[in-house]
Image (cartoon, grey):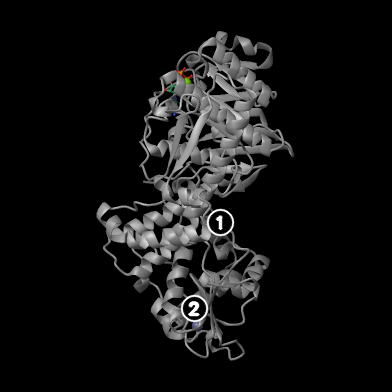
Amino acid sequence: MARKTQGPEIERLIQLLARMPGLGPRSARKAALALLKRRADLLEPLSRAMSEAAERLRDCPVCGNLDTVAPCTICSDERRDRTMIVVVEEIGDLWALERAGVVNGLYHVLGGHLSPLDGIGPDQLAIPRLVERAVPPVTEVLLALNATVEGQSTAHYVREQIAASGVAVSVLQQGVPVGGELDYLDDGTLAAAIRSRRPL
Amino acid sequence: MWISRLVLTDFRNHARLELNLDRRPVVLAGANGAGKTNVLEAVSLLAAGQGLRRAAYPELIRRAGAGGWAVAATLETDAGPVEIGTGLDPSRPDAARGGRIVRINGEPQSGSGALAGLVEMAWLLPSMDGLFTGPAGDRRRFLDRLVLGFDAGHAMRAGQFERAMRQRNRLLEDGVRDAARFRGLEHVLAETGVALAAARVATVAGIVRMIEARHARTPDSPFPWAALALEGALEADLTAGRPAVDVEDRYLESLASGRERDRAAGRTLEGPHRSDLVVGHGPKGMPADASSTGEQKALLIGLVLAHAELLAERRSGAAPILLLDEIAAHLDVRRRAALFREIRLLGSQAWLTGTDPIAFEALLNDAQFIPVRDDGIGRQAVSPHPADDDLSI
Ligand SMILES: Nc1ncnc2c1ncn2[C@@H]1O[C@H](COP(=O)(O)OP(=O)(O)OP(=O)(O)O)[C@@H](O)[C@H]1O
Ligand SMILES: [Mg+2]
Ligand SMILES: [Zn+2]
């Protein structure tokens, strides 16, 4: 057994930080140390912000976004164009599109993509809820799914499910490299992709 | 294109090997087990794909080494020198994902695919001697490698097709009968499948044209001209001049109507993963698999040379790198001389291996001779045989 070098609270903090994406054990120790050294202006405010967020966090019952209000800020924003729904795989994609500021419509987060190999079928995704939403005043559903095999086959599936509603379905055309995930694109590329959508 | 510097670190039996080269052919000479083929394998990893043995990357780590391997090279191209680095570092968190690290001019790449548009390479190995008599999968892979020289996106599309097919096979296996779920995947299969077939058709047409030109130039070449035909429903439709969109629609229909048949078979029975490259001995009008061992070898060399010449033509004269393992051993004096002439004519930095440098005497002043010695340890593991539906290149 290795010798203990700090109390259990700090060890726990390091262990939890190490579970964050992009942080390994080493950078987790570094982050922990930074927090501990800056107790008043970092550790305590962060801890408060986190417990507040944890307390108020809600899944948006409409679009699947995460927010502290339900429906989410986007769904409740009256200035948004309610005729258009942009469908994404993950909340991270929604955030990327919002960051790029290229969507004025509403969103729908599927929560992943169809993947029989991973046991993910339509029932594991928010597809039925999307079909319910694809009715007037909505006139266009833009499928902003990843340019991967799973993203593209999911797009075809979703289009078929919506087809009966008469709502127009479009997909991103250019800018998204094949195999590309939206989350990784820069704002300019995302903007070009949204502008160049085409009917599916 | 040629390699001016090659450094292997903990690669197979080589703890460290550093070569500084000029643009002439490279002759690697040394005893059995010295590590000559290993050097060719290292060079082959400068191109896209899994390397010439298609070995799993951890197998390449030198036994008794530090763990991990690296191949670094300076590639001289029309556009100037390019630094390529590739390897495996098991200590990196992403190592478990199965890929290798690839850097071009120091920039990390997301996979070896980025090398496809940069490095052109073809190889001939003793293990390919049975290409014409062996399983169709081997010929398909051979063909797809040839295609890669003209269509850098080919390997990626093959990967997508395979992925979609595996997803579809799982739906079949799971007893799913919701047609909409199949259609989503079958659209991807049709799009990528027809693109794969079209790239094959175009490549074969180019090679056939080059074979004809070579035959006209040297009618009595010891490397007989090959008659090539592509076997596969999509390829046949495209060759017949049917528009790609129609071929896509037909494939979509046949996938849909074939679902129950495929379910019974436990796999997708129709598509570019079942195609074959049928080769014939041109002058004799015989199927290649009915030709003699020596004739098959000569046929294969002729095919690879035609492909290399076609690549060179497309790149306004810049010949691909050829990796020719134990090539001299199988050729009589006349064929050997003819091969060296061809290599010289092409201007390729061919890499040749042999146990006896005498076999390369005719190349004496036109090649750089490099003795290869074993500096270590270990026996080589046998890599598992790939599945027949495998489209990876
Ligand atoms: N991962 C590894 N670590 C250490 N040694 C290895 C590894 N993989 C293979 N070897 C060894 O490398 C040696 C050289 O292999 P290679 O196939 O390159 O020989 P060669 O010079 O081409 O011989 P031949 O003339 O018989 O074809 C073999 O003895 C093999 O056991
Ligand atoms: Mg060898
Ligand atoms: Zn919402």
Mark 1 chain: A
**Quarter of the figure with the N terminus of chain B:** top right
Q: Amino acid at mark 2?
A: His
Q: Nearer the viewer, residue B198 or B63?
A: B198
Query: Which SS class for mark 2?
Result: strand
Q: Earlier in the sequence, mark 2 or mark 1?
A: 1
Residue B214 circle label = none
For the image, the number of numbered tags is: 2
The residue under label 1 is which amino acid type? Lys
Task: Tell me if B169 is positioned left or right of B61 in this view.
Answer: left
Tell me the residue at 37%/70% (across/down): B180
Compared to residue A106, the image places residue B267 above or below, namely: above
Q: Is mark 1 within 8 Å of ligand 3?
A: no
- Front residue of B146 and A86: B146
Percent of width and height locating residue B32: 45, 15
**Dot label at residue A108:** 2
The percent coordinates of residue B153 (x first, y second) are 57, 49
Q: Is residue A72 above or below residue A181?
A: below
Q: Label 1's element? A: helix
> How many C-alpha atoms fall within 10 Å of the one at disc 2: few (<14), some, or many (≥20)?
many
Left or right relative to B143: residue A1: left
Q: Which mark is in front, 2 or 1?
A: 2
Q: Residue at x 48, y 57 (%)?
A: B247
Q: Is residue A6 shown left or right of residue B368?
A: left
Q: Which residue is mark 1?
A: A30
Quarter of the figure with residue B294: top left
Q: Tell me the distance, in whole angstroms, between the alpha carbons under discs 2 and 1.
A: 37 Å
Q: Is residue B93 visible?
A: no
Instruction: Locate residue B387, reporting x and y percent.
Output: 35, 42
Mark 2 falls within which chain?
A
Residue B381, position as x, y percentages in the image: 37, 29
Q: Which corner quadrant of the figure contains ligand 1?
A: top left
